[in-house]
Image (cartoon, rainbow, N blue to C red):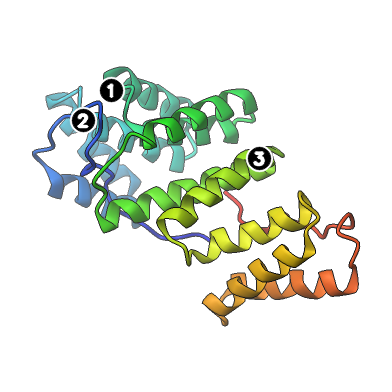
Amino acid sequence: MKRVVTIVFAGLVFIQAVPAFSEPFFYKDVERRMAAKEFDEAESLLGIYLSLNDKDVTALSMLGRLYQEMGNRKRAAQYLNKAIKVNPGYPPAHFFLGKSYYMDMKDKEAASELAVFREKMGLVTGMSGEDRAFYITMLDETSEIYYNLKMLDDFYEVNQSILKVSPDDQVAVYNMGVYYYVNDHNNSKAYQAFNKAVALSPGSELANKAKYAIEFMRANPDSRMAPDFDFIDKL
């Protein structure tokens, strides 16, 4: 279950300062075009903007994201690395670079960049509602990557981070049910988490997945017989 969030992660207060942004409406226009899959238009706008300001960490990261969505991960990595060189403390660049490495099956590099992303996010203060939503979206995808890489301790920590920010986040609650069942073999905690995931949004796709997990647990009380939880979320 994917969250649809099309906002610019530019308004945060970093311990390592991010350059001021004089064109917030420009960023939102690019985001809108990316969401509409108007990739050529978004690429053209970013290219023109960066020709005037080639040190803009947000625009560099957006262009990296754009190439990632277009399937050109080599160019994506190029621009994301440029963004990191400009400002190593900018978390989204590390996140999207880690995601790009993961999609290229460079698991060690992906894990390394995602660890930096989490470290840099720990320095962020003063998140607005929109920035918080984008942060949670990045953590969601980070948890998916950790689960698929069998890095279950990190999977647990990331979902706990989400729940600290948003205690009723359905995806994180569901993921905790998976963790308790698969890793801890704790049926009681798993039941609680899956039931809460259902209660948070009873008619949702994720609620149906939680119901499936509950029924599986009832039919197979031995938690070592885990169902296929690969359906959590896919990148």
According to the picture, the residue beneath numbered tag 1 turns out to be: 87
Label 1 CA crowd tier, 10 Å (few <14, some 14–19, many 20+):
some
Mark 2 or mark 1, earlier in chain = 2
Q: Position of residue 154 (x, y in %)?
A: 61, 39
Residue at (61%, 76%) from the top-left corner?
Answer: 198
In the image, residue 122 sits, relative to residue 226, either above or below, namely: above
According to the picture, the residue beneath numbered tag 2 turns out to be: 18
In the image, residue 113 sits, relative to residue 179, either above or below, namely: above
Q: Position of residue 168 (x, y in %)?
A: 48, 67
Amino acid residing under circle 1:
Asn
Is there CB contact under 8 Å for labels 2 and 1? yes
According to the picture, the residue beneath numbered tag 3 turns out to be: 153
- Position of residue 159 in the picture relative to residue 216 (left or right): left
Mark 3 or mark 1, earlier in chain = 1
- Position of residue 11 in the picture relative to residue 105 (left or right): left
In the image, residue 29 sits, relative to residue 146, either above or below, namely: below
Is there CB contact under 8 Å for labels 3 and 1? no
Label 2 CA crowd tier, 10 Å (few <14, some 14–19, many 20+):
some
